[in-house]
């Protein structure tokens, strides 16, 4: 039985989002889903990790507007969805967060319409 070629989309939350962002170019991923990407250590905005977000790969960052690790700015192929009232755990309004991810996946043709 042959395995159908599928696009590779890497994803993670918090430090896993950093790992996904850094490894996506090495693995030829077509997309990155970065949940609660920790832009900087709490209270240290001068130590930005924005450079870890991949260039040229469609990337969705989903962060809460009250995340003490900060929220990256959208740039190039990096889109940012800010969840109102959410902190780093992104537990507030999980259906809304999932909906934002599904919209992004569908827009890129990586998820079917139901």
Image (spheres, rainbow, N blue to C red):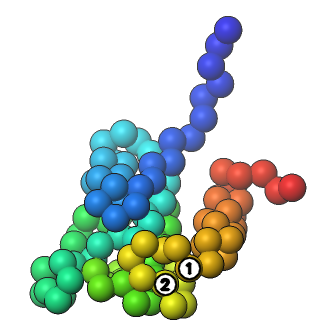
Tell me which corner region of the image, top left, top right, bottom left or bottom right, holds residue 113: bottom right
Q: Residue at x 51, y 42 (%)?
A: 8
Q: Nearer the viewer, residue 29 or 68?
A: 68
* Residue at the disc numbered 2: 86
Q: Residue at x 60, y 35 (%)?
A: 6
Give left or right: position of 87 versus 95: left
In this rendering, is residue 108 above or below 25?
A: below
Q: Residue at x 29, y 60 (%)?
A: 15
Label 2 residue SS: loop
Give left or right: position of 81 versus 88: right
Q: Which mark is residue 18?
A: none
Tell me which corner region of the image, top left, top right, bottom left or bottom right, holds residue 98: bottom right
Q: Residues within 10 Å of mark 2 (few under 14, many from 20)?
A: some
Percent across and percent down for residue 111 are 71, 52
Label 1 residue SS: loop
* Residue at the extreme top: 1
Percent across and percent down for residue 23 are 30, 47
Q: Which mark is residue 92?
A: 1
Task: Find the distance from the CA under tag 2 to the CA under tag 1.
Answer: 5 Å
Give left or right: position of 8 versus 42: right
In this rendering, is residue 68 above or below 108?
A: below
């Amino acid at each position: 039985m042959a395995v159908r070629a599928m696009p590779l989309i890497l994803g993670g939350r918090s430090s896993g989002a950093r790992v996904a962002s850094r490894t996506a170019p090495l693995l030829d991923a077509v997309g990155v889903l970065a949940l609660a990407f920790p832009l900087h250590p709490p209270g240290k905005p001068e130590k930005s990790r924005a450079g870890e977000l991949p260039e040229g790969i469609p990337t969705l960052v989903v962060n809460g507007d009250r995340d003490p690790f900060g929220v990256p700015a959208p740039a190039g192929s990096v889109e940012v969805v800010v969840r109102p009232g959410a902190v780093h755990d992104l537990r507030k309004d999980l259906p809304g967060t999932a909906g934002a991810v599904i919209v992004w996946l569908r827009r890129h043709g990586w998820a079917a319409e139901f």
